[in-house]
Amino acid sequence: QVQLVESGGGLVQPGGPLRLSCAASGSTYSINDMGWYRTAPGKQRELVATIDKGVATNYADSVKGRFTISRDNAKNTVYLQMNSLKPEDTAVYYCDAYVTTYNRRTFHYWGQGTQVTVSS
């Protein structure tokens, strides 16, 4: 069993920064692609950023230049540094990961979500 646990959400003023973390634990033989998604009120879940095992990254156009995804493979952790936050960034943020377990099977896991609210 694998768990993804997010942390770092909260209330921040427009223009401010926030850093999210997501740590994977359990039967993690290898963690492949990891990413962040978000669900805003009344909207569908959308991709924010992804990072592969080789640290190649991909970003949604709406966050390019403001958000940075990174990972620490030794800690099985992915981060999302969010700068210049806007009210429209308000959403529940979810991390995901493709994990190969010790029996060499690959599964897709989601974290429980963390609320980010950008408001003055």
Image (spheres, rainbow, N blue to C red):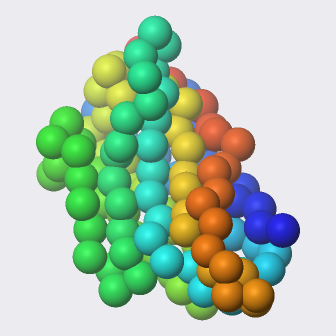
Q: Quadrant of residue 101?
A: bottom right
Give the image location of residue 61, x and y in percent. 15, 42
Is any atom of residue 36 visible in this view? yes
Classify residue 24 as left or right of residue 39.
right
Q: Is residue 108 above or below residue 30?
A: above
Quadrant occupied by the N terminus: bottom right
Q: Is residue 30 above or below residue 83?
A: below
Q: Residue at x 70, y 43 (%)?
A: 112
Q: Nearer the viewer, residue 51 or 114?
A: 51
Give the image location of residue 17, x and y in percent. 39, 44
Q: Residue at x 55, y 64 (%)?
A: 97
Q: Is residue 24 above or below residue 111?
A: below
Is any atom of residue 90 visible in this view? no
Q: Is residue 30 above or below residue 20?
A: below
Q: Quadrant of residue 55?
A: bottom left
Give the image location of residue 28, x and y in percent. 71, 81
Q: Residue at x 34, y 45 (%)?
A: 48
Quadrant occupied by the C terminus: top left
